Amino acid sequence: MEDVIFDMTRQSLWIATLISAPLLAVALVAGLAIGLLQALTSVQEMTLTFVPKVGAMMLVFWVSMSFMTSTLVTFFQRDLIPIIEGR
């Protein structure tokens, strides 16, 4: 029983990493690009870093929402629900 719990925990963490990777990658790239732009132009405006990063993350979330949903549904249907039902 312990091995099943550890395996489910490992798979859950992997799914969480897989689902969050697109959003984190876009936040990293947008933050790096905006930071570089601010360093080159000497403009130090706080909203300049926040608004484009949030906008890019919302766009990527909207685009990758079907991937996230299908990944979670597959994980639940294939792995988690059979364990809960006792199969």
Image (tube, rainbow, N blue to C red):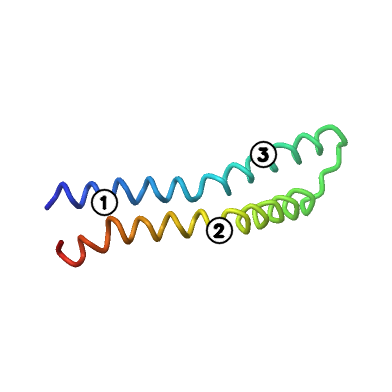
Task: Tell me the distance, in whole angstroms, between the alpha carbons under discs 3 and 1.
Answer: 32 Å
**Depth-wise, is mark 3 or mark 2 nearer the camera?**
2
79 or 39: nearer the viewer: 79
**Depth-wise, is mark 1 or mark 2 nearer the camera?**
2
Q: Residue at x 63, y 46 (%)?
A: 27
Which is more N-terminal, label 1 or label 3? Answer: 1
The residue identified by callout 1 is 8
* Residue 29: mark: 3
Q: Is residue 25 above or below residue 87?
A: above
Q: Residue at x 50, y 49 (%)?
A: 20
Residue type of the residue flagged with mark 1:
Met
Please tell me whether mark 2 sits on a helix, a strand or a loop. Answer: helix
Q: Is residue 58 left or right of residue 87?
A: right
The residue identified by callout 2 is 65
Residue 30 x %, y %: 70, 43
Q: Is residue 69 left or right of residue 50?
A: left
- Which quadrant of the figure has residue 43? top right
> Do residues under tags 3 and 2 come within 8 Å of each other at their CB atoms?
no
Q: Is residue 36 above or below residue 14?
A: above
Residue type of the residue flagged with mark 3:
Val
Q: Residue at x 46, y 46 (%)?
A: 18
* Residue 70: mark: none
Question: Which quarter of the figure is the C terminus placed in?
Answer: bottom left
Tally of numbered tags: 3
Residue type of the residue flagged with mark 2:
Met
